[in-house]
Image (spheres, coloured by chain):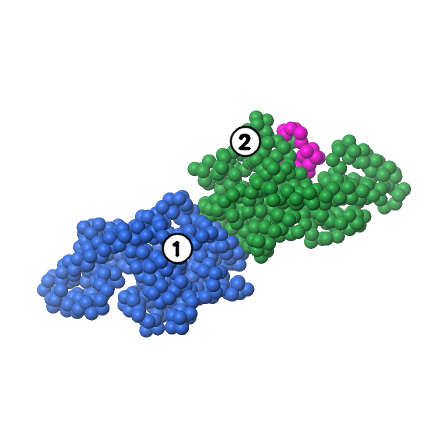
Chain colours: A blue, B green
Amino acid sequence: MKKIIDPYGSELPQDYTKLIKDFGLEKFNPEDFPSSNRLMRRGVVFAGRDLKIIAKAIKNKKPFYVLTGIMPTNDKLHFGSKMIVELMAYFQKMGAQTYILVADLESAAARGVSLEEARRRAMEFHIPAYIALGLDPKKTIFYFQSQNRDVVQLGFEFAKKITLNEFKSIYGNADPGRIMSAVIQAGDILYPQLKERMPGIIPVGVDQDPHIRLTRDIVSRTKAKKFFAPSSIYTKFTPSLDGSLKMSKSKPQSCIELPEDVETACKKIRRAVTGGRATLEEHREHGAEVEKDMVFELLKQHLIEDDEELDQIYGEYKSGHMTSGQLKDLACEKMTIFMTKFEKDLEDARKTVSKLNFIKF
Amino acid sequence: MKKIIDPYGSELPQDYTKLIKDFGLEKFNPEDFPSSNRLMRRGVVFAGRDLKIIAKAIKNKKPFYVLTGIMPTNDKLHFGSKMIVELMAYFQKMGAQTYILVADLESAAARGVSLEEARRRAMEFHIPAYIALGLDPKKTIFYFQSQNRDVVQLGFEFAKKITLNEFKSIYGNADPGRIMSAVIQAGDILYPQLKERMPGIIPVGVDQDPHIRLTRDIVSRTKAKKFFAPSSIYTKFTPSLDGSLKMSKSKPQSCIELPEDVETACKKIRRAVTGGRATLEEHREHGAEVEKDMVFELLKQHLIEDDEELDQIYGEYKSGHMTSGQLKDLACEKMTIFMTKFEKDLEDARKTVSKLNFIKF
């Protein structure tokens, strides 16, 4: 039986290599892309679909786009969103036309957030946060889903192209609300190609792959429209500080949000699962089990940009010279620097939102 | 097992009395409504849901609305649409706020009609035809589905409120395209209540009852929004001239369209199934089987306004004084008068479309 990843639910992939095989993904090779970023170099980005067409567009300076959506339900971000923004910023630097949509229809339907409230949250927090995390606002095209009639029309057309069974085989189930969200989302993913026919890449967590599959199926079902099937690029999850697969607000003690006050964040880091040994003696003798260490993972994925610095820490910790406590001190220090800068950049970005490039409908 | 009426398909109800029972409809009583129109008086309108609240609103001069949609796929109307317009016009005269939406999203998705083409057809034909058939354009509010964000947002929210099984039990199946159409249509049906909370009535052919049931279910599922469940009023089908249940373009020889050139229409009438006897002698002796006569049905439903005139024809035909040939001559004459007037009124109405009351979005 085909394994289902449910992008809305709780079933999560345990084995990324197996995922690549089961879902027919391409293994990501950082050497295919110029100036790979931290996430790409360190295997946090681990797979994709149709990556070559994007690598080629970058190489030949041909038009392509990168796109993501903002769900304005929450007033915080998480590290998963941060990774997506960093990949968006990477492709933006490589020349991608950059689209960010605010999924206000979705947040209204799923969570009862009014369109006005969604707009407020997007303008006051999410968009400034995305800018603070590295997007160039001058080079980014924004729109609200509810204002984009083309997207709604595409979604409507796409719904007629898929059967219930196809939908079930991709998503595992087919609630009407899920169907409607998914086809509108496919409309979002392909929307930039209404303006200019070009390949596009969608950075997502691997749990979002069903949306990519559905959209690719729809493209093959609507040949007359000559859409490029969307390429995609997948990040691993940022693990929960308690060692489970995905950092999630459902376990607030093991989840650091963006922003979070530094004291709270450091408290959480101090309670994290580490690869330290039971006693100092054992630790000095055998060294840390770095692979099991959630604090090291946080440093690797998010807090240390420089590869040599990370290598040095790895060596000291692995050899037992550095203790878990020292690693936590270091992580707390890095987190403080990061969070302080993020909050300042967020404040600065808020001043620029009046000048953003929103599509006029 | 619950019987399914499929509003999109070919399964059609044979027995209206049984339908009332099976679907829990109210039998329509023309005496509940002041100044009942021809269709109401003659049993062509045969059932409804929540009719009392509308009768009460009329009696007490309280706000209520009547709503229908235009599917701008075709460049002709049929007699079924004519009945709906006549009911719209009746409720409009009784004080209803009158809404007509152009289902351009639906026609784009289902038939590939572009929004521009849908607009052209609606403005050049469908809306003028509705005016020609009796709607007062000054008192009617129009909108295009694709421009109405509130409707799309309602549809999106409603999709989250229904399960796939509920959908299946109402429609008999649940293709994604059908789901999307249906929830957007529920959005249309309830949209006027976003502006003013009031009951509303939707005149439909009985094959459209699933949309009404779905919308009523959605209302009961979204209590916080305090919508009135839509009332509905059902017309029988105009039978095909060959004696089958529903006049349909799939049998062009037995279907008179609006407009249709008079000569062709008369030819079709002359080929219609009648209640005349095998020989003139038998006819004079036993009289016509009026109940089986499609020409009489056409006169009754559409071509003769005056009840006494219709009664007189009934008497003469039933008694055998009038032959089927004479009845056909009469029907052809009435059809000519009707069609000539319709085409002239259509031409006049076309001149008024620039002044219509379209909602500004």
**Which residue corresponds to mark 2?**
B63
A253 to the left or right of A61: left
* Residue A357 tag number: 1
Horizontal and vertical percent for residue B163? Answer: 47, 48
Which numbered mark, 2 or 1, is in the foreground of this view?
A: 1
Query: Where does the magenta region start and end?
Result: B31-50
A132 to the left or right of A23: left
Horizontal and vertical percent for residue B55? Answer: 59, 30
Residue in the foreground of this view, choosing between B38 and B318? B38
Residue at the image position 25 percent from the left and 61 percent from the top: A302
B241 to the left or right of A161: right
Horizontal and vertical percent for residue B132? Answer: 68, 41
* Residue B247 tag number: none
Real-space Cα distance between discs 2 and 1? 44 Å
Is circle 2 on the same chain as circle 1? no
Q: Amino acid at mark 2?
A: Pro
Q: Chain of mark 2?
A: B
| Residue B337 visible in the displayed image | yes
Residue at the image position 72 percent from the left and 40 percent from the top: B302
Q: Helix, strand or loop at disc 1?
A: strand
Q: Magenta stretch containing residue B332, yes or no?
A: no
